[in-house]
Structures are given as structure tokens and as C-alpha cells.
Image (cartoon, rainbow, N blue to C red):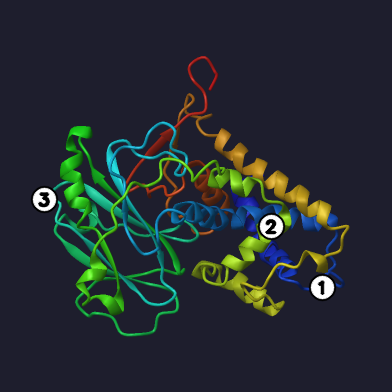
Amino acid sequence: MSARSFIAGIGGTLFFLGILAGLPQAGTGLDKEDIYRIGLQAYVYAYPLVLLDQTRQAFIQRFPMNRFNHALAFPPPAARTVVRPNIDTLYSSAWLDLSAEPIILSVPDTGGRYYLVKIMDAWTETIAVPGKRTTATQAGEFVITGPNWRGSLPSTLPVIKSPTNLVWVIGRIQTNTSADYANVHVLQKGFKLVPLNSKDQAGSAAPLSGNIPPGNVGNSPTPPAQVAAMDAATFFKTFTALLKDNPPHAEDAPLVAELKAIGISPGEPFGPVKLDPEVLPALESAVRDAREKIINQIRMTGRERKGWGLNRNIGRYGTDYLTRATTALGGLGALPAEEAIYTGTVKDSAGNL
């Protein structure tokens, strides 16, 4: 099945989520095959949101929300929290909660040095990339707002509107080998996050320095492994809870209207006890096969280019949910093509890897 035809079933996906929200099974006219087909699409649709939140939880066990945390050295080979970390830039990462108020992002004057700050919503969609290519390298400030903010904002600052309250900010600064670390550390201190109503409090602007975790806390599994271990009930319970603060995108408006027509309320707890017990095995099969579908899509990389794949249509996905899920698993936080080109392969010259 093509990605286009696979994505076309998303209306059914959202109808299925209505069932998951607790609507009665009787009268829907859905048999096991319908549940399987729609569940398959629902998993792919929901996967990036669930994975991103699991990644956030791995970070905030050691670092708080709304504060920058700086990688002071290149990630070691054992790093697993982030897929495909860079080894020619140092990261400055932060998770934002915009539910209470906007956050003001400050960036330093890098003196012409390449840098960027990717701002990504909870669905892994790139919403802005301040940096050398877009805003030059002088010092600057930006206001990042959530979907429900209705208050006033500083008239002199650019506004970055996020469609979700959860935002991941990933800064990268050009680092010319480990000998350049000290110079980059000075610049990292210029990255600051301050709540809008605390802007005049100088103490609140002080960044929290530290190393971004090279692996996971203790012996806990990686975020992708944690999501893969979820059964259908756990996965969709997590997903519906996340929908409360992270609604679907504007381009899904017709589908959102359809959800409302059948009584969907984002964030309503998933109630498997309300489902017909005979349906649950079909739902579990859908989740299992959806995982395999995402993995197989990654394995397809490079088959038409002598073993190498070139991913251009990433970072911004629209309604291409399969590509979005595949990218989340294979390269969470990937930049759009105007910022970076990603090549990859799953085989070496001998056909192994």
C-alpha cells in the first residue's frame, strides 16, 4: 500500500479514536477487520506524539522544564536518548510547557558562527528555526506562545506560535573539534528562556548548565523501546491524555469536526472496559503490525539509490503521517531540508549491516 493511500484512511483513524475515548461499541457497524484497519492507521498517526512525550520524560528526570540544558561535549557512541546526534555541533536543549504563559527565547551574538535553534511542536512538526540562515547571527529575542494564549505580547519581539503546549527546543552551535569546546560554552550561556511575566526578574534568566544525558537514567529502556513495549490499551490511553494539551493541526480541521460530531473530547481517558472484548485482539494485532510497518518503511531507505537514502520531505509533514512516524523513530528532531540533508543506509557494501 502506498503512503498516500495509507494516509487517506485517517478519517477512519479519528473515528476509531472516538471509540477509544469511551463511546459504546454497539451500533457502530464496525467489525474486527474495521477495527484492525483503523487501529493500524491510528497507531501511525499517534506514534510521534507518544514517542516525543516519552523522550521528554527521559530528559526531565534530570533537568527541569523551561530551562536550557547544555551538552558540554560531543555525544559518546553509547548515547541513545536522541537518535542520530550530531558530532560537529554542541546541543542546547529545552522542553517548554506553554500552558501557563509564553516563553521568551534569547539567543546570543555568535559573531558569524553557524548556529540554529529548531523549535518543534509535540507532533514533531518544525514551527520555526531561528539561526544564521533565517535571522543572522546577532543577539535576539523571540516570544513562543501556546495555542490558548490570548494575552498581550511585547510589540517589538517576533512571535512564534506553537499549536501545542509542549514544545521541544533544540539548539545547535558549530563546534570545530573538541579544541573549540570552550568557545562554544561561552555562547551556550547566551541561550536563555524566561516566562513572559518574569522578564524583568534578572535572576530567572540564569541558564541551568549541565550535560544532556548521553544515555538513559539508570537502566531504563530508550524512549522508542518504551513505546514499543506498550500494549494497545496503554498506548492509546497515553495518546488520548496527550491530546488535551496538544490538539491536532489545523489541516486536520475536517477530521476534528468529524470527531466532535461523534462526541470525541481530547484528553478523555481511554476506557478499554467499554470495548467489546472480542475487538481487543484485533486492536492488539493492529498495534503490532503498525510498529512493523513503520520499521519496514525505514528499511526501505536507499533501495532505489544504490543502498543510500536521501530524506528531503522531513521536518514538516502536513498530513503525511507515515513519513512523520518513520522519521520520529529513525531520526527524532530531524530538521527540514532547507536546514539539513540526511543520508542513510541499512546495508554495507557486502549487503550486511
Query: Which residue is identified by label 3?
Result: 111
- Taking the image as shown, residue 334 lies to the left or right of residue 229, namely left
Query: Which residue is identified by label 1?
Result: 24
Quick one: which residue is furthest to the top in this view?
Answer: 350
For the point 86% across and 63% down, which residue is it? 276
Q: Secondary structure at mark 3?
A: loop
Choose the circle earlier in sequence order: 1 or 3.
1
- Taking the image as shown, residue 336 lies to the left or right of residue 155, namely right
Residue nearest the observer in this picture, 54 or 21:
54
Is the residue 133 above or below the residue 80 in the image?
below
Q: Position of residue 209 (x, y in %)?
A: 28, 53
Q: Position of residue 324 (x, y in %)?
A: 52, 51
Residue nearest the observer in this picture, 337 or 85:
85
Residue nearest the observer in this picture, 226 or 217:
217
- Disc 1 + disc 2, Cβ < 8 Å: no
Look at the image and tell me whether residue 62 can be seen: yes
Quick one: which residue is furthest to the front in this view?
Answer: 218
Q: Specify few, some or many for label 3: CA neighbours under 10 Å numbering under 14, 14-19, or 20 or more.
A: few
Mark linked to residue 234: 2
Q: Position of residue 176 (x, y in %)?
A: 20, 35
For the point 23% across and 56% down, which residue is it? 134
Q: Position of residue 214 (x, y in %)?
A: 41, 41
- Kind of residue at disc 3: Gly
Q: Secondary structure at mark 1?
A: loop
- Kind of residue at disc 1: Pro
